[in-house]
Image (cartoon, rainbow, N blue to C red):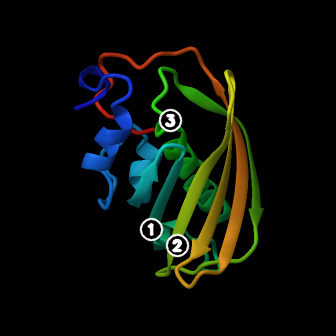
Amino acid sequence: MGYKETPSGKVLQYIKDNFVGKLITESRSPAGNWLQFTLENIEKGKATISLEVRYDMTNPYGNIHGGMMALVMDEVIGWSVVSLDTDNHYTSLNLNVDFLYAIKQGDRLRATAEVIREGKKIIHVECRVEHQNGTLLGKASSNLIVTGMKPKDGDSKVAN
């Protein structure tokens, strides 16, 4: 079931029914699918994902690469925006990232994004990424702008 079969106002419930607690490999985001994260929780304006840091996500020191950490943040931010169940697509204006601590290959992280302000044109979202032991690894904020593009009947996947 995708947008064609998911009327406005029903996307969040569809995600809850079909994605929560599962490894995400079938979203509209190829980069997100590559991350192989689990959608831990989603509610209106807030999403949490978790994943294990794999070898192909690391820098030469065996820690998560900064670009991979930014991808994790951007992906969970996207899910928090999708949870708003709007009739429009949004795209990032910016992504401001603070890297605070490293996480090594084999360790698990959890990222949570929450919509702080949903304006008519711009949505502001904040994100926090923590190690499985609770250490704050990084944080981000992002502003996303409405694109004016509507979901197409051919869109076969709901998230991101």
In the rendered structure, the answer to whether residue 118 lies left or right of residue 28 reads: right
Who comes first in sequence, dot 3 or dot 1?
A: 1
Q: Residues under labels 3 and 2: Cα distance? A: 24 Å
The residue that mark 3 highlights is 84
Mark 2 element type: strand
Q: Which residue is mark 1?
A: 51
At label 3, the amino acid type is Leu
Return the residue nearer the eye: 101 or 83: 83
* Percent position of residue 131, x then y: 58, 78
Question: Mark 2 = which residue?
Answer: 109
Going from N to C along the chain, the mark reached first, 2 or 1, is 1
Q: Residue at x 70, y 67 (%)?
A: 138
Could you tell me residue 100's position as x and y percent? 75, 72
Q: Residues within 10 Å of mark 3 (few under 14, many from 20)?
A: some
Disc ID at residue 155: none
Nearest the camera: 130 or 53? Answer: 130
